[in-house]
Amino acid sequence: MHHELPRNSPISGVHYFLRGLRLVFHPQLRLFVLVPLAINIALFIILTTLLVQYFDELTNWQIPLPEILQFLEKTLKWVAWFLIVVVVLIGYGYSFNIITNILAAPFYGLLAQKTEELVTGQKLPDESLLLMILRTVVREIRKLVYFLTRGLFIFLVMLLLGLTFFLNFLVPIVGTLWSAWSMSIQYVDYAADNHKTDFGLLRRILRKRRYSSVSFGGVVLGCSMIPVLNIIAMPAAVIGGTLFWVNEVKGLQVTRPPAENKK
């Protein structure tokens, strides 16, 4: 499998996720999908209920316009409605991913391990369940800190763009690119963590595979924004992220930036 696709290609990024979907119910993986799937269903019910309750209020939000711009009121309302819908759906998909991944991290680590063993035929070193749980939870906290700190900066950029009349159309673009990058890191990292790969090193590798990374993360984000589909999309993303790891990341040597080489 891992020699049949071009590396660092938008096509391969999409392919990893689609193949992950096909492998979700593979007999050797099915058991490791069931528990996170149950978590996803419970979370789906809670978040979708909240989204439905508050969606109308968000889309009916009014922004007072200066008198000179009132002739554009109808057009601006449609633009504002579109931007709000896109941002709300991105937030819904992003929240669904973050919360699910914290709760299901140990199971996703096992799923990534079994997926890699299935596609490579090579068994990974045994590890006790307790150590895997501790390792994956610590790693999720590390990722969460990264996402929150960088995400705050991205939010401020989006806020500034949203307040700039002729640049506010960039808000969903910036939000989508950041979220796609985050999804790529999130789901390739389960296999990386199984190999004790440093989190910073993984990010540098994925930057070198930016086309595959953004396309893979973008597909995951898109599916996580669609109710019902997002239930199955998360385990499929773990499997797809493992395929990404095997084909494009595993064994790739990335040197540290010069500043990091200095003692």
Image (cartoon, rainbow, N blue to C red):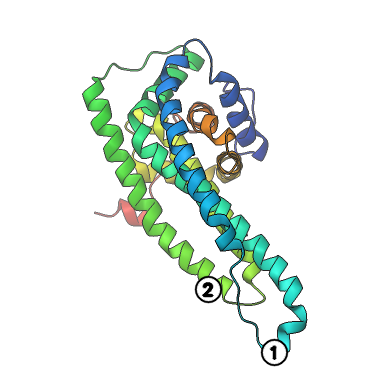
Q: Are marks 1 and 2 in contact (CB under 8 Å)?
A: no
Closer to the chain start, of discs 1 and 2, is 1
Name which residue lies at 55% across and 42% down: 209
In which quadrant will I find the C terminus?
bottom left
Q: Are there few (<14), some (14-19), or many (20+) residues within 10 Å of tag 2?
A: some
Identity of the amino acid at label 2? Leu
Q: Is residue 16 above or below residue 145?
A: above
Q: Position of residue 93 (x, y in %)?
A: 52, 46
- Residue 75 visible in the snapshot: yes
Mark 1, residue position = 67
Q: Are there few (<14), some (14-19), or many (20+) residues within 10 Å of tag 1?
A: few
Check disc 1 and report its element: helix, strand or loop: helix
Residue lying farthest to the bottom in this orientation: 68
In which quadrant will I find the N terminus?
top right
Name which residue lies at 63% across and 70% down: 168
Q: Closer to the camera, 13 or 32? A: 32
Cα–Cα span, label 1 and label 2: 23 Å
Q: Is residue 246 above or below residue 202?
A: above
Left or right: 1 as drawn, with respect to 111? right
Q: Quadrant of residue 14?
A: top right
- Residue 252 visible in the snapshot: no
Q: Position of residue 64 (x, y in %)?
A: 61, 81
Q: Position of residue 254 (x, y in %)?
A: 43, 41
Q: Position of residue 219 (x, y in %)?
A: 61, 40
Q: Quadrant of residue 34?
A: top left
Identity of the amino acid at label 1? Glu
Check disc 2 and report its element: helix, strand or loop: helix
Q: Quadrant of residue 22?
A: top right
Q: Is residue 66 above or below residue 120?
A: below
Q: Nearer the viewer, mark 1 or mark 2?
A: 1
Mark 2, residue position = 160
